[in-house]
Amino acid sequence: MFLKAFTFIETLVVLLIISIIASVAVYKSFFSLEKAHLLQIKSDIALIRNAIIKKHNQSLLLGNVNRYPTKLDDALSNIANEKLFDDVLDYPIFSTSHTQKELSKWIKESKTIYSIYLTSSNSVSFNYDQNKGTFECDFQNKLCKELYQ
Protein backbone atom coordinates (compact mmCIF):
# COMPACT_ATOMS: atom_id res chain seq x y z
CA MET A 1 0.00 0.00 0.00
CA PHE A 2 1.47 3.31 -1.09
CA LEU A 3 0.77 6.55 0.74
CA LYS A 4 0.52 9.59 -1.44
CA ALA A 5 1.60 12.90 0.06
CA PHE A 6 1.98 16.42 -1.15
CA THR A 7 5.37 17.42 -2.41
CA PHE A 8 7.28 20.23 -0.79
CA ILE A 9 6.61 22.54 -3.75
CA GLU A 10 2.85 21.88 -3.66
CA THR A 11 2.79 22.70 0.05
CA LEU A 12 4.73 25.93 -0.56
CA VAL A 13 2.32 26.98 -3.33
CA VAL A 14 -0.70 26.42 -1.05
CA LEU A 15 0.94 28.39 1.78
CA LEU A 16 1.79 31.19 -0.64
CA ILE A 17 -1.81 31.40 -1.86
CA ILE A 18 -3.15 31.41 1.71
CA SER A 19 -0.72 34.14 2.76
CA ILE A 20 -1.69 36.34 -0.22
CA ILE A 21 -5.39 35.95 0.55
CA ALA A 22 -4.78 36.71 4.25
CA SER A 23 -2.73 39.83 3.51
CA VAL A 24 -5.43 41.18 1.17
CA ALA A 25 -8.12 40.49 3.79
CA VAL A 26 -6.16 42.30 6.53
CA TYR A 27 -5.48 45.25 4.20
CA LYS A 28 -9.18 45.53 3.24
CA SER A 29 -10.40 45.24 6.83
CA PHE A 30 -7.96 47.95 7.99
CA PHE A 31 -9.22 50.42 5.39
CA SER A 32 -12.87 49.52 5.92
CA LEU A 33 -12.41 50.23 9.65
CA GLU A 34 -10.80 53.58 8.80
CA LYS A 35 -13.70 54.40 6.48
CA ALA A 36 -16.18 53.43 9.20
CA HIS A 37 -14.56 55.94 11.58
CA LEU A 38 -14.68 58.62 8.89
CA LEU A 39 -18.35 57.93 8.20
CA GLN A 40 -19.11 58.08 11.94
CA ILE A 41 -17.43 61.48 12.19
CA LYS A 42 -19.30 62.82 9.15
CA SER A 43 -22.54 61.54 10.63
CA ASP A 44 -21.82 63.22 13.98
CA ILE A 45 -21.07 66.54 12.28
CA ALA A 46 -24.32 66.43 10.32
CA LEU A 47 -26.25 65.45 13.45
CA ILE A 48 -24.79 68.31 15.51
CA ARG A 49 -25.40 70.87 12.77
CA ASN A 50 -28.98 69.73 12.27
CA ALA A 51 -29.60 69.86 16.03
CA ILE A 52 -28.30 73.45 16.17
CA ILE A 53 -30.66 74.43 13.33
CA LYS A 54 -33.54 72.62 15.06
CA LYS A 55 -32.94 74.56 18.29
CA HIS A 56 -32.74 77.79 16.30
CA ASN A 57 -36.04 77.05 14.56
CA GLN A 58 -37.69 76.21 17.90
CA SER A 59 -36.42 79.53 19.23
CA LEU A 60 -37.88 81.38 16.24
CA LEU A 61 -41.23 79.69 16.75
CA LEU A 62 -41.22 80.90 20.36
CA GLY A 63 -40.68 84.48 19.15
CA ASN A 64 -36.95 84.81 19.87
CA VAL A 65 -35.45 86.40 16.77
CA ASN A 66 -32.23 84.82 15.46
CA ARG A 67 -31.33 83.08 18.68
CA TYR A 68 -28.97 80.15 18.34
CA PRO A 69 -28.10 78.01 21.38
CA THR A 70 -25.62 79.86 23.62
CA LYS A 71 -23.81 76.61 24.40
CA LEU A 72 -23.85 73.04 23.21
CA ASP A 73 -23.30 71.37 26.60
CA ASP A 74 -22.06 71.77 30.17
CA ALA A 75 -19.26 69.19 29.87
CA LEU A 76 -15.80 69.72 31.30
CA SER A 77 -12.85 70.18 28.94
CA ASN A 78 -10.54 67.27 28.04
CA ILE A 79 -12.32 64.75 30.29
CA ALA A 80 -13.39 61.30 29.11
CA ASN A 81 -16.99 60.10 29.32
CA GLU A 82 -18.53 63.57 29.57
CA LYS A 83 -21.90 64.13 27.87
CA LEU A 84 -21.25 66.35 24.86
CA PHE A 85 -23.82 68.29 22.83
CA ASP A 86 -26.61 67.39 25.27
CA ASP A 87 -28.10 70.90 25.08
CA VAL A 88 -28.92 70.33 21.40
CA LEU A 89 -29.03 66.55 20.90
CA ASP A 90 -31.69 64.24 22.31
CA TYR A 91 -28.97 61.67 23.05
CA PRO A 92 -25.53 63.02 23.98
CA ILE A 93 -22.24 61.89 22.50
CA PHE A 94 -19.71 60.74 25.10
CA SER A 95 -16.29 62.34 25.05
CA THR A 96 -12.73 61.10 25.14
CA SER A 97 -9.59 62.89 26.28
CA HIS A 98 -6.23 63.75 24.74
CA THR A 99 -4.59 60.98 26.76
CA GLN A 100 -7.02 58.33 25.48
CA LYS A 101 -7.28 59.64 21.89
CA GLU A 102 -10.14 57.32 20.94
CA LEU A 103 -10.82 57.49 17.23
CA SER A 104 -14.06 59.14 16.12
CA LYS A 105 -14.81 60.40 19.63
CA TRP A 106 -15.11 64.08 20.49
CA ILE A 107 -13.02 66.08 22.96
CA LYS A 108 -14.24 69.34 24.40
CA GLU A 109 -11.41 71.89 24.27
CA SER A 110 -13.27 74.96 25.52
CA LYS A 111 -16.79 76.37 25.66
CA THR A 112 -16.97 76.58 21.86
CA ILE A 113 -14.13 74.38 20.51
CA TYR A 114 -14.33 70.62 20.03
CA SER A 115 -11.77 68.23 18.52
CA ILE A 116 -12.02 64.79 17.07
CA TYR A 117 -9.23 62.31 16.23
CA LEU A 118 -9.21 60.95 12.69
CA THR A 119 -6.07 58.94 13.42
CA SER A 120 -4.18 58.37 16.65
CA SER A 121 -1.98 61.38 15.90
CA ASN A 122 -4.18 63.69 13.79
CA SER A 123 -7.19 65.59 15.00
CA VAL A 124 -9.49 68.26 13.60
CA SER A 125 -10.90 71.12 15.68
CA PHE A 126 -14.39 72.51 15.24
CA ASN A 127 -15.58 75.88 16.48
CA TYR A 128 -19.18 76.66 17.42
CA ASP A 129 -20.18 80.25 16.67
CA GLN A 130 -23.34 81.00 18.63
CA ASN A 131 -23.94 84.23 16.70
CA LYS A 132 -24.06 82.49 13.31
CA GLY A 133 -25.05 79.02 14.49
CA THR A 134 -22.13 77.43 12.66
CA PHE A 135 -20.13 74.38 13.69
CA GLU A 136 -17.10 74.43 11.38
CA CYS A 137 -13.49 73.37 11.13
CA ASP A 138 -10.70 75.36 9.47
CA PHE A 139 -11.02 74.67 5.74
CA GLN A 140 -7.30 75.39 5.30
CA ASN A 141 -6.65 72.18 7.23
CA LYS A 142 -6.18 69.15 4.94
CA LEU A 143 -7.98 66.85 7.38
CA CYS A 144 -10.93 69.24 7.52
CA LYS A 145 -11.22 69.15 3.75
CA GLU A 146 -11.20 65.33 3.90
CA LEU A 147 -14.35 65.40 6.02
CA TYR A 148 -16.22 67.27 3.30
CA GLN A 149 -15.36 64.97 0.41
Image: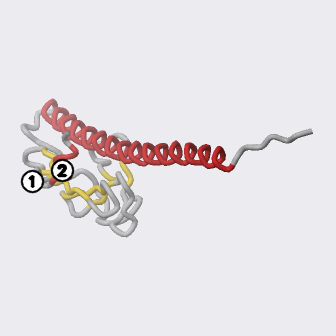
Q: CA distance from mark 2 to mark 1?
A: 7 Å
Task: Name the element at disc 1.
Answer: loop
State the residue position of label 2.
144
- Give neighbour class at mark 2: few <14, some 14-19, many 20+ (Cα, 10 Å): some
Which of the image's four quarters has the N terminus?
top right
Indicate the position of residue 135 as horizontal and vertical percent values: 17, 47
Residue drawn at (39%, 63%), measured in percent from left and top?
Answer: 80
Where, by quadrant of the figure, is residue 118 drawn? bottom left
* The C terminus lies in quadrant: top left
Q: Is residue 46 left or right of residue 130?
A: right
Say above or below: 105 vs 13: below
Q: Is 127 left or right of 117, judged from the image as shown?
A: left
Q: Which mark is residue 122?
A: none
* Left/right of residue 138 with respect to residue 118 in the rendered view: left
* Residue 47 pos. (x, y %): 28, 39
Q: Which residue is mark 1?
A: 140
What's the amino acid at mark 1? Answer: Gln
For the view shown, which residue lies furthest in the top direction?
61
For residue 5, side relative to residue 70 (left or right): right
Q: Residue at x 25, y 38 (%)?
A: 46
Q: Is residue 39 above or below residue 115?
A: above
Percent coordinates x, y for residue 65 in the rendering:
7, 37
Number of callouts: 2
Residue 20 % position (x, y): 51, 45
Q: Residue at coordinates 24% horizontally, 63% vertically from top-left?
A: 109
Q: Contact, CB < 8 Å: mark 2 with mark 1? A: yes
Which residue occupies 39% across, 58% down?
102
Identity, as a three-letter code, of the amino acid under mark 2: Cys
